[in-house]
DNA sequence: CTGAAAGCGCTAACAC
DNA sequence: GTGTTAGCGCTTTCAG
């Protein structure tokens, strides 16, 4: 900038004014400066600007995994809102590791991002208290913070799961299995409680062995399924509720595998016969094109991201009202798999 | 930091040394400083650090749309490599708009990101020349730059499409339709040329009306499909090659719709009868669970991201060799839809 | 081993 | 309208 000023034969501040489009520069002078800028290939150094103004025009998003469709939709919505406010977005994946979450969050704080949106993995967020005290705007999305109060945007997980399970019950099922995430995760606990509520409301007793929490990879899901569908059970389950996106797909893949095996070998296999009713929490692409199409309790990941980001920018614009807690509804999307009747 | 120094009763530089883990500080002094840091809730201001050192430990990624599965996988891989190098990642979606691309890229340059990975949308990248001259490390991914030479990581689109179409030909098809992206997009042109090559090699003449370029939304794809499957054609196509992920899914959805309609109404509809052979460029989740399962030419989006990022960090580490051009292979994944025989 | 001084590139606050 | 000065918070350099 100094160089530009020298080249244009004007003062430093005049260049600054031109670069920032501030008023009070004669068109002639501005043109002179602009030419010097072009000739020198000058570009304003935002690091310096940030240091001076204290604003970075950047926000951070910490979530589990950018590559997961749920988070990538959330990410896209946050980015869109950020862009409309002239901010750039840092994205960071915690891989659901509390340590990594705090490392990333604090790294973003060191950069002095204007605000942070977090889908937390940690079970204690007091490490952020000093940052909040120092002026960090913070919004929690999808899961609430622990150890502090802050703006939070959640999904009505319990109600959603309850709706999904009640839907199965309405279609004649009483023995319904549940495969969900580890109970470490907030949303998982909420969804499980929705399952229990729906069963209780219908007066349907729950056999605790119908509940499998925490199988993460394909193989574990297969094991859980084998256990749930064990043919030696006196009262086998007739329907299944899956607690998230990835689990639903894993279950579908396992069932398809068993069906293929049974078709090929002719040997009856648990899960080898189509007809198990299924409702999944969280929608996913192509759910409508499978056979049967998959009934889901749909969340709105983009809405979650958009709402969180809007809340964040409202704070950055000076909204000093008490922390807000927003809960977004879910929508049951019947497509076929959840309307299959129980056998006999 | 000044405050910390005052509180600890030491010099500024000593605090700096402690904060950065530099050697040459007595353990006792370090402990003193650390206590002052904790008490004050001090966190180093990276904006200032960046200004001084010239390094931001941040890179940028500009692509079409973070929410698209292809890009979110690429994004995830880039982020992982960045993290392993201690860098944070800015993600920005251009929505395939050249203006937006350059705005975002230049905004990232203003922040003095250490490097930039771009999936370009623009048709001229000379606007980046001053930035490169100023030291920006730049890698193009998936599509090459126009108007300058830089490190580039591409996929072998032509060979992939050729393989896919040859696969259909090997299964007895001669009249093969092609639905692809706008010819404005590099990858689209390459894939179309692969289609032409495969047809030429098989001595199969191409009717230009079999080729539909540019239908983007669901409705347009439906129109294109109606045109391709027009029952008044003397020689109807027996197979279809789709140029990307989104188009494949859109086609599947259209076909499913026609089949459903025909089942319900009993009125024969073009595309209403299953059996059209299909190979799609680009893999997608659940392709294996559809009926029939979808044969695809799979790319490796994560590999693309990883390779690009590794190349970028090699440059940042001082690799000054001439620009590299890496081409990643595709893999044909036969699953059923591409092995359907032509009728009669 | 520790500290004082200079300056990274910019903008805020004032002169002129 | 335009220029000058000071200083954002840090690291680099060099002296103790």
Image: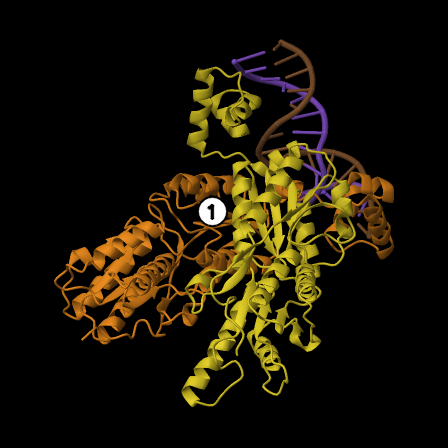
Chain colours: A yellow, B orange, C brown, D purple
Mark 1 neighbour density, 10 Å: few (under 14) some (14–19) many (20 or more): many
| Quadrant of the frame with the C terminus of chain B | bottom left
Tell me the residue at 60%/54% (across/down). Answer: A92
Residue with the mark numbered 1: B93
Q: Confirm whether residue B215 shows in the render.
A: no
**What secondary structure is marked by label 1?**
strand
Instruction: Indicate the position of residue B192 as horizontal and vertical percent values.
Output: 25, 59
| Quadrant of the frame with the N terminus of chain B | top right
Instruction: Tell me which corner region of the image, top left, top right, bottom left or bottom right, holds residue A59.
Output: top right
Tell me the residue at 32%/56% (across/down). Answer: B187
Q: Confirm whether residue A284 shows in the render.
A: yes
Instruction: Indicate the position of residue A185 as horizontal and vertical percent values.
Output: 68, 62
Q: Is residue B44 above or below residue A17?
A: below
Instruction: Tell me which corner region of the image, top left, top right, bottom left or bottom right, holds residue B338.
Output: bottom left
Q: Is residue B292 above or below residue A32?
A: below
Q: Nearer the viewer, residue B208 or A126?
A: B208
Instruction: Tell me which corner region of the image, top left, top right, bottom left or bottom right, holds residue D6.
Output: top right
Q: Nearer the viewer, residue A276 or A58?
A: A276
**Protein chain holding label 1:** B
Instruction: Indicate the position of residue A308 as horizontal and vertical percent values.
Output: 62, 45
A179 horizontally vs A252: left or right: right
Tell me the residue at 77%/49% (across/down). Answer: A148
Instruction: Indicate the position of residue B128 as horizontal and vertical percent values.
Output: 42, 42
């Amino acid at each position: 900038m100094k160089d530009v000023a020298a080249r244009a034969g004007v003062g430093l501040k005049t260049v600054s004014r031109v670069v920032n489009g501030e008023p009070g520069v004669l068109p002639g002078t501005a043109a002179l400066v602009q030419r010097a800028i072009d000739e020198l290939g000058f570009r304003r150094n935002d690091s310096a600007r940030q240091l001076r103004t204290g604003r970075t025009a950047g926000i951070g998003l910490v979530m589990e995994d950018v590559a997961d469709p749920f988070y990538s939709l959330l990410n896209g919505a946050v980015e869109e809102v950020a862009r409309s406010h002239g901010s750039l977005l840092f994205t960071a994946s915690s891989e659901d590791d509390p340590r990594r979450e705090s490392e990333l969050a604090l790294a973003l704080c060191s950069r002095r991002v204007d605000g942070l949106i977090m889908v937390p993995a940690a079970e204690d967020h007091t490490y952020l208290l000093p940052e909040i005290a120092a002026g960090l705007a913070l919004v929690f999305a999808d899961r609430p913070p622990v150890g502090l109060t802050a703006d939070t945007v959640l999904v009505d997980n319990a109600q959603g799961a309850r709706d999904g399970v009640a839907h199965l019950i309405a279609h004649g099922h009483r023995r319904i299995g549940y495969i969900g995430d580890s109970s470490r995760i907030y949303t998982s606990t909420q969804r499980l409680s929705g399952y229990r509520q729906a069963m209780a409301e219908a007066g349907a007793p729950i056999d605790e062995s119908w509940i499998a929490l925490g199988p993460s990879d394909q193989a574990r899901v297969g094991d859980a399924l084998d256990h749930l569908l064990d043919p030696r059970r006196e009262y086998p389950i007739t329907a299944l509720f899956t607690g998230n996106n990835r689990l639903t797909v894993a279950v579908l893949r396992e069932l398809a595998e068993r069906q293929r095996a049974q078709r090929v070998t002719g040997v009856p296999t648990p899960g080898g016969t189509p007809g198990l009713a299924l409702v999944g929490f969280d929608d996913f692409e192509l759910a409508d094109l499978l056979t049967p199409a998959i009934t889901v309790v749909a969340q709105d990941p983009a809405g979650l991201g958009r709402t969180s980001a809007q809340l964040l920018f409202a704070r950055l614009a000076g909204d000093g009202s008490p922390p807000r807690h927003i809960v977004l509804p879910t929508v049951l999307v019947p497509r076929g798999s959840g309307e299959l009747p129980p056998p006999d």
